[in-house]
């Protein structure tokens, strides 16, 4: 059930009192044809109806009722066009302004909200529930917003918020796929603490950031080398280099803008590059040895981009609206120059969760068959590295956020099938195998949504995409957490890749 009840005003460029007869006729006629277009034949009395109208000087007030087939605001837009065409030639008037005075939408949800009081929405004056039945009173929408489907998105958002009340606090699905043998642990210490002790790393210079001295830098670079040589090269991945700054429109398209606005680091530009206009601030800095916050605020723009959160959005952007030749499929690329920034706030600990991390992100675009085959090959190469080169104790799990499990339907089923695989490693310093939380040090996903939203096509087949994160800090923590910092406990293959230990510095 869905019912729309709209009160709206059209203001014309001049009085339309003379044209009342023609307006009446246009409305009568529209009620029979124009406002019924799109209603399936099987539906009786469907569509929209102008229930009443009045004219005063240049203002036409309308009351429109409708069902889901021709939503009242669409009827209003149709009618506006019709009236312009009808009244223009003869009466020399046109609609100058369109506004909504009241818009009530009544609909049935799939389920009643658990906590109706908590549901609020922008552009909605009032939302009330009677079990599954919901009435929305919408205001503040202009013509532009109506044309751009705000009403549909408000209803979508409402449904999302009701659904969210059902999965709040629930764990995401976690299903073990495979686990390595139990392995002997070289130590049970926290590698971050020990590396600080040995001056391999230094905390800072700002929250959640780290400085890697030569020893740790070499560990990270060695892991990078291993991943490229043992995983990416054998599978034919090509390296690309992207920008570290991501404009909001790219994040809107990938869903990051709505998904992680609370974790993004934002980038601002100076309002001007003219040094003269910066003189006052420069004077302050020179004299006070500090940055005057308020003055600076006046000199910079509000952010319109963020620092890379994951490399894949910009890679998808680079293929936006492209048709990829069958010969180039599957596209296999990786990015390893741009660090990722995430405001982890309270979640930080050691190097397992940092605000700026280094990751190789391989991205793949291809047909479903190609990507499902690639997924198996990637897992095989990863397994080889974790077993033969790093020799760690790890496991693989299929994971899915709760909301995906809930939203049924065959398409979603398939999505689940493509889904995400997490790689997790045991960290002895956190406790026993059974009770402690294992560290997610990598993952691998295949998606439908990005090729869709960026309109990436092939010559024939539908394309899917996916990515897999090789977080260097996380791989390092999985490795060092189990093998320790002393080389005699490192597996031979890793040690060979590592080469000579850098001298580092003796800090007195
Ligand atoms: P978590 O649940 O641990 O926050 P996530 O789901 O946010 O992880 P993804 O967005 O899937 O992680 O990131 C992919 C990979 O990036 C992770 O597997 C990990 O290797 C790495 N990673 C993510 N966040 C961090 C971080 N704060 N510090 C270091 N590495 C990270
Ligand atoms: Zn990604
Ligand atoms: Mg996270």
Image (cartoon, grey):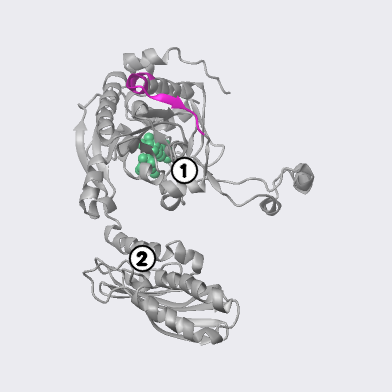
Q: Work out whether residue 353 can be spotted.
A: no
Label ID, residue 453: none
Q: Is residue 20 magenta?
A: no
Residue 240, percent from left and from top: 46, 28
The residue lying toward the viewer, choosing from 346 and 387, is 387
Cβ at disc 1 under 8 Å from ligand 1: yes
Residue at the spot x=23%, y=25% of the render? 183
**Sequence-first disc among 1 and 2:** 2
* Residue positioned 41% across, 20% down in the render: 225
Residue mark closest to the camera, 1 vs 2: 2
- Labels 1 and 2 touching (C-beta < 8 A): no
Does residue 355 lie above or below 377 as drawn?
below
- Quadrant of the image where one finds ligand 3: top left
Kindly identify which residue carries mark 2: 155
Q: Position of residue 322 (x, y in %)?
A: 43, 37
Q: Which residues are magenta?
A: 229-242
**Residue 494 image-quadrant placement:** top left
Image side of residue 285 versus residue 263, left or right:
right
Q: Which residue is mark 1?
A: 342
């Amino acid at each position: 059930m869905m019912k729309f009840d709209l009160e709206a005003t059209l203001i014309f460029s001049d009085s339309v009192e003379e044209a009342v007869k023609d307006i009446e006729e246009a409305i009568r006629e529209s009620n029979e044809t124009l406002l019924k277009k799109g209603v399936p034949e099987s539906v009786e009395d469907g569509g929209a109806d102008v229930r009443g109208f009045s004219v005063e000087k240049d203002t036409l007030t309308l009351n429109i009722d409708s069902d889901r087939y021709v939503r009242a605001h669409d009827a209003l837009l149709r009618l506006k066009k019709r009236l312009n065409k009808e009244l223009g030639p003869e009466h020399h008037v046109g609609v100058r302004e369109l506004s909504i005075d009241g818009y009530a939408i009544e609909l049935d949800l799939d389920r009643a909200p658990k906590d109706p009081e908590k549901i609020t929405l922008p552009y909605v004056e009032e939302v009330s529930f009677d079990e599954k039945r919901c009435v929305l009173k919408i205001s503040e929408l202009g013509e532009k917003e109506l044309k751009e489907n705000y009403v549909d998105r408000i209803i979508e958002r409402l449904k999302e918020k009701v659904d969210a009340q059902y999965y709040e606090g629930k764990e995401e699905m976690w299903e073990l796929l495979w686990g390595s043998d139990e392995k002997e642990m070289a130590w049970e210490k926290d590698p971050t603490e020990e590396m600080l002790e040995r001056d391999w790393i230094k905390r800072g210079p700002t929250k959640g950031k780290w400085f890697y001295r030569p020893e740790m830098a070499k560990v990270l670079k060695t892991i990078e080398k291993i991943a490229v040589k043992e995983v990416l090269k054998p599978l034919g991945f090509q390296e690309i280099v992207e920008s570290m700054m991501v404009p909001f429109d790219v994040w809107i398209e990938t869903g990051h803008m709505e998904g992680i606005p609370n974790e993004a680091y934002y980038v601002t530009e100076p309002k001007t590059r003219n040094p003269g206009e910066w003189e006052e601030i420069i004077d302050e800095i020179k004299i006070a040895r500090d940055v005057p916050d308020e003055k600076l605020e006046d000199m910079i723009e509000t952010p319109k981009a963020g620092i890379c959160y994951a490399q894949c959005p910009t890679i998808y952007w680079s293929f936006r609206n492209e048709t990829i030749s069958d010969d180039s499929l599957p596209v296999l690329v990786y990015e390893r120059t741009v660090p990722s920034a995430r405001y982890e706030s309270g979640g930080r600990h050691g190097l397992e969760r940092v605000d700026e991390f280094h990751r190789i992100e391989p991205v793949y675009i291809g047909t479903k068959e190609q990507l499902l085959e690639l997924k198996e090959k990637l897992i095989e190469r990863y397994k080889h590295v974790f077993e033969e080169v790093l020799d760690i104790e790890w496991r693989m799990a299929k994971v899915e956020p709760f909301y995906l499990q809930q939203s049924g339907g065959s398409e979603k089923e398939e999505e689940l099938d493509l889904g995400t695989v997490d790689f997790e490693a045991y960290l002895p310093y956190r406790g026993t195998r059974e009770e402690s939380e294992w560290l997610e040090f990598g993952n691998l996903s295949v998606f439908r949504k990005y090729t869709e939203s960026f309109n990436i096509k092939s010559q024939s087949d539908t394309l899917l995409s996916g990515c897999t994160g090789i977080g260097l800090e996380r791989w390092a923590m999985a490795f060092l957490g189990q093998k320790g910092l002393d080389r005699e406990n490192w597996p031979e293959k890793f040690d060979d890749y590592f080469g000579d230990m850098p001298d580092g510095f003796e800090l007195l």
